[in-house]
Amino acid sequence: MGKLIVVACGAGINTSTMAEDSIKERVAQEGFSDVEVKRILMADIDGFLGRTDLIMVVSMMKIFRTFNVPVFQGMPFLIGSKQEKDELLDKIVEVIKKV
Amino acid sequence: MLEFNESLIAFDLQAKDAQEVIGLLAGNMHAQGLVSAEYGAQTLAREMVHPTGLPTKPFCIAFPHADAEGVNRSALGVAVMHQPVKFQNMADPDEGLDVMLVFMLANRDPEEQIQTLRNLAVLFGQPEKLVELRDQATLQAVASWLRRELRLS
């Protein structure tokens, strides 16, 4: 079964794309072939939480609830230094490897 | 192709609030036929519900945008503020941020503008670059600085 990562933002098309792009690039570098990165609207998240292939939520907004999978705050993908971006990607890779 | 030219830049702008900045930048875009007449109102409506202020260092920035509807051609508008203007924090809408730079991206398709989005994310992450942009002496200097840093044609 594949591994699904959803990147959620408020409404727009731009900010979640920035995070999605960074994660996809790293996923390709690591050679993970079974990982899907999908950007969604936060309002639609409930439709994804029941999916058995969901392994992680990356949220561009403040996280105000709990999920049954690991959650990361994705703001560093927009405004973090290169080091901060890489550190967040390291944590994401760790989760991918564990599941 | 991303439209970017000097008429899309507001330099040393004195504005009382985010609404005024968004209205001005959207008006510049509309004057060139890049977006519909309603694009400013759409962007403002979205900003109210899903704000786009970002807590960058050493001062904050904002990244207002609406959906692709109303965008005829993708474009970037920029405001360099004379004094800070309040935008709410994207990550925490209850928090007001003092914004000195506003990047308004009218985007038809994020995939199409992926390289510009990448370059913006690199820029947003570098405090010394944001200061450099804020401190450009003229509107023309702002335009050429952005062309170079964002690799816009």
Image: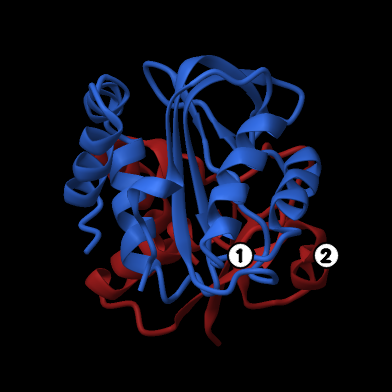
The N terminus of chain B lies in quadrant = bottom left
Chain A colour is red
Badge 2, how many Cα within 10 Å: few under 14, some, many 20+? few
Identify residue for label 1: B35
Chain of the residue under label 2: A
- Where residue B115 sits, quadrant-wise, is bottom left
The chain assigned the colour blue in the figure is B
Chain of the residue under label 1: B
Badge 1, how many Cα within 10 Å: few under 14, some, many 20+? many
Q: Which amino acid does label 1 sit on?
A: Val
The C terminus of chain B lies in quadrant = bottom left
Labels 2 & 1 near each other (Cβ < 8 A): no
Tell me whether marks 2 and 1 sit on the same chain: no
Q: Where is residue A61 in the image (x, y as percent from the top left)?
A: 65, 42
Which-is-in-front pick, marks 2 and 1? 1
What residue lies at 49% left-to-right and 63% top-to-bottom?
Answer: A17
Identify residue for label 2: A46
